[in-house]
Amino acid sequence: MPNTQLKKKFILTCEHAGNEIPEKYTSLFKGKEEELYSHKGMDFGALRLAKHLAASINLPLYYSTISRLLVEANRSLDSDELFSEFTKKLPVKEKETILNTYYAPHRNQVEEQISNLTASGYQVIHFAIHTFTPATDGEVRKAAIGILFDPKRVPEHTIAAQLKEQLTAHVPELHVVYNAPYPGTADGFPTYLRKRFIAEEYAGFELEVNQKFFLNGEPGIWDNVVAAVTDSLRGVINQNR
């Protein structure tokens, strides 16, 4: 059973917050700019959702606005997806420069903050805010919200269940699922952090929201989803005080 007596601190991150390409590298995308303005270049709506959560619930937020097509902030250093088709063939030294300048600062800042909090006796609850494309390879994704986590880590299973219950109570019509559209244990920032911190120190989640709510042209629909996620996360925090 999880130690419910542990003091908890909630933090937010957003690894695909923007599609910025530093001027030095814009030539790599000449003629392919549309890729930057697709779901391949950024998570539409993710930063807006993350900023709303941070402001409404008073949570710390760490994010990267560099496009994942330059370097993938949500992948580990040994991942084949760390660099995209546009940057894979760059010289090793140039890749090291990109990693040191645009990848490491975000990840190091978050890991350092978690280290500081755990050293002070807190269990850190981390929500990485993402959005996913409504369809891929001709398949329409039915999920509205996915909660990604490691089911083998008891604190994560407990909090995931709390969040799903909260979301379902606020918006019963939304299809909320576990570990979809991606497995919660696939390579990602929380998966990396689980290797650095034990379950009593760290519980990591990726919260995936379907981009259809942001892209459908009706702000009211997106606002309702944002409000539901905000109220649900606030409810989870209150349950874990």
Image (cartoon, rainbow, N blue to C red):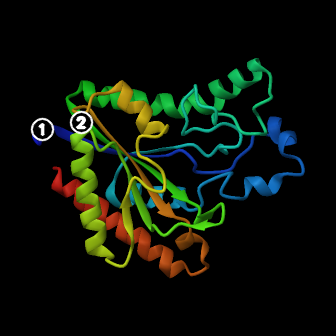
- Any mark on residue 3, and which? 1
Say which element carries label 2: strand
The reply to whether the C-beta atoms of the residues labelled 1 and 2 are less than 8 Å apart is yes
Give the vertical position of 18 relative to 229 (above or below): above
- Any mark on residue 122, and which? none
- Residue that extends furthest to the front in the rendered view of this protein: 138
Residue ID at (55%, 62%): 45
Residue 95 relative to residue 238: left or right: right
Give the vertical position of 48 relative to 217 (above or below): above
User: Which quadrant of the structure image shows residue 94?
Assistant: top right
Give the residue number, with chain letter if any, for mark 2.
Answer: 123
Decide which of 218, 153 is in the foreground and name it: 153
Q: What amino acid is at disc 2?
A: Gln
Mark 1 or mark 2: whose residue is earlier in sequence: 1
Decide which of 69, 109 is in the foreground and name it: 69
Residue ID at (37%, 27%): 195
Picture coordinates of residue 16, whole percent (x, y)? 58, 48
Say which element carries label 1: loop
